[in-house]
Amino acid sequence: MTHSYRITLLPGDGIGPEIMSVTVDVLKVVGQQLDISFEFNQALIGGAAIDTTGEPLPAQTLEMCRQSDAVLLAAIGGYKWDNLPRHQRPETGLLGLRAGLGLFANLRPATILPQLLDASTLKREVVEGVDIMVVRELTGGVYFGQPKGLFTTETGEKRGVNTMAYTEAEIDRIGRVAFETARKRSKKLCSVDKANVLEVSQLWRDRITQLASKYPDVELSHLYVDNAAMQLLRAPKQFDTIVTGNLFGDILSDAAAMLTGSIGMLPSASLGNSNPGVFEPVHGSAPDIAQQDKANPLAQVLSAAMMLRYGLNQPQAAESIEQAVLKVLEKGDRTGDIMSPGMKQLGCRGIGESLIKVLENA
Ligand code: NAD
């Protein structure tokens, strides 16, 4: 039976359109091979949307996303929009998309591919075999807690305020995503907090511990965030799935990502309860290499694989894309960012063509 999905494409800015174009071609080939049909609809976000409509997330874009089965996003931002007021900045569009779709869970894998072992700045024996999934809470915590803002004290001094707050329900729903994710992997979950200092973290630890009784097959551990940061660099192989709040997750997921040494290779998924998920590379819009056919499209392509696995429940199609990426790397095809001696340097389009060839010969 043909499965049919409506996908909203948000190419955004900088290298976004280039890496999106490669990814759509890959999806079309995999779709034909596995009897999956995609209806692609494109919409504006970020700087491209500001230039056309004056706002970074037009209502029409959000509505199109809501009506789709999944959203594939590339990247937003660039020098041109850096000095606009905050509500008109490209990043505001991204936050609006996450909030508008209720995307409270951000999944970021950091996997060391054997073909790219030498791209890491850490020693081979420390990183070889690393396969971590960071589950970050995305719509709560200190980025959204009230009160927040810049206030003036009685003495006329400015005071900046943000509030780290989580309700039990917010902790439970991200906790469930994390336990379910760990279940699909090696069944090991590490919850990261700062419960020795913060009340909000004590609540986090209590709720995650309570939730563990519903997942007896998953081994739960806890770490304070400062120790987690050290352990990630010292012995990253001890981790499988990590769950943590918004701020700690923002920092730790970047640190975990850098174990792999190649920002152009890292995908992510943002999930909610009922709305479609958003699947996007971890990197930004790389304005320094935009429109030069230099961008590595593999993070975007791997984001499409995450879309198939976590958003559309099509694991076979996801696996097919992931295997094609590995084979392209095995052949020695590389973009500049992951180039090493003896390999063949290609542009964004060249890597796309190589992927299609591998898929067609699989
Ligand atoms: P960046 O990730 O865009 O680029 C950092 C460095 O990595 C650059 O040298 C870039 O050339 C390189 N790089 C990134 N992706 C690459 C790829 N696929 N292939 C090859 N090289 C790649 O981060 P930045 O320079 O700090 O930010 C640039 C713009 O992107 C800013 O406007 C920023 O706000 C925005 N940004 C957007 C997102 C997003 O859309 N989610 C995330 C981060 C930054």
Image (cartoon, rainbow, N blue to C red):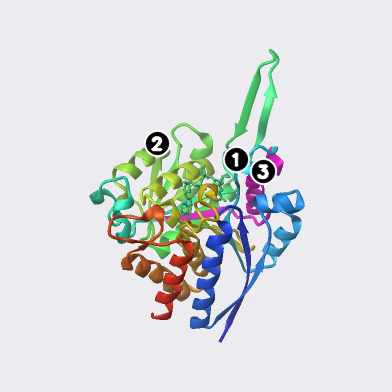
Quick one: quadrant of the N terminus?
Answer: bottom right
Observer-nearest residue: 335 or 65?
335
Tell me, yes or no, whether the highlighted magenta stretch contains residue 269: no
Report crowding for label 2: few under 14, some 14 to 19, many 20 or more residues within 10 A (C-alpha). Answer: few
Q: Position of residue 359 (x, y in %)?
A: 42, 76
The image quarter in which residue 58 lies: bottom right
* Tag 2–tag 3 contact (CB < 8 Å): no
Observer-nearest residue: 142 or 269?
269
Q: Which residues are magenta?
A: 86-109
From where the camera sits, is residue 84 visible?
yes
**Tag 2 residue:** 226
What residue sits 41% from the left and 44% below the top? 255
Residue type at the position of mark 2? Asp
Q: Position of residue 9 (x, y in %)?
A: 62, 64
Residue type at the position of mark 3? Arg
User: Could you tell which of marks 1 and 3 lies nearer the N-terminus?
Assistant: 3
SS at mark 2?
helix
